[in-house]
Image (tube, rainbow, N blue to C red):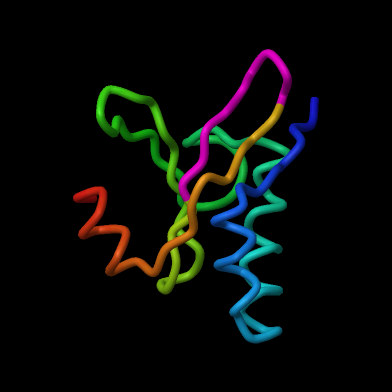
Amino acid sequence: MMYGVELSKEAEEFLYFFDDKSRRICIKNLIKLEYNPYPGKGSGDKERIVVKGEEVYRLHIGRTYTAFYIINEKQKIVKIIEILSIDKAHKKYGY
């Protein structure tokens, strides 16, 4: 079963300022989450992390960006909550 992928307003704004090539690469990687958003399955460098007691997942996009997302299994929706440069992601989330 496929999952719907939704972007938060913050994630949309982040993608808006990308050049066409970077935006295309990010979207191509985010679409992979439709098939299997869980780590260890499907393609992509995915990991489950716990942030402030909440389960969050991260997806590395190349060696440049990291997308953070949550999974609503009941509704089969992956919500991209944030996309950051890898450096900012490591500073914010400590991973």
Q: Where on the picture, by quarter, is residue 74?
A: top right
The answer to whether 82 is drawn above or below residue 54 in the figure is: below
The residue closer to the viewer here, 27 or 51, is 51
The residue under the point 48% across, 36% down is: 40
The residue under the point 39% across, 69% down is: 85
- Counting from the top left corner in percent of width and height, residue 33 is at 65, 43
The residue under the point 67% across, 84% down is: 21
Residue 69 lies in the magenta-colored region = yes
Residue 22 lies in the magenta-colored region = no
- Counting from the top left corner in percent of width and height, residue 25 is at 64, 72
**15 relative to 81 in the view: left or right:** right
The residue closer to the viewer here, 35 or 71, is 71
The residue under the point 58% across, 45% down is: 80
In what quadrant of the picture does the N terminus appear? Answer: top right
**23 relative to 53 in the view: left or right:** right
What is the span of residues highlighted in magenta in the rendered image? 68-76
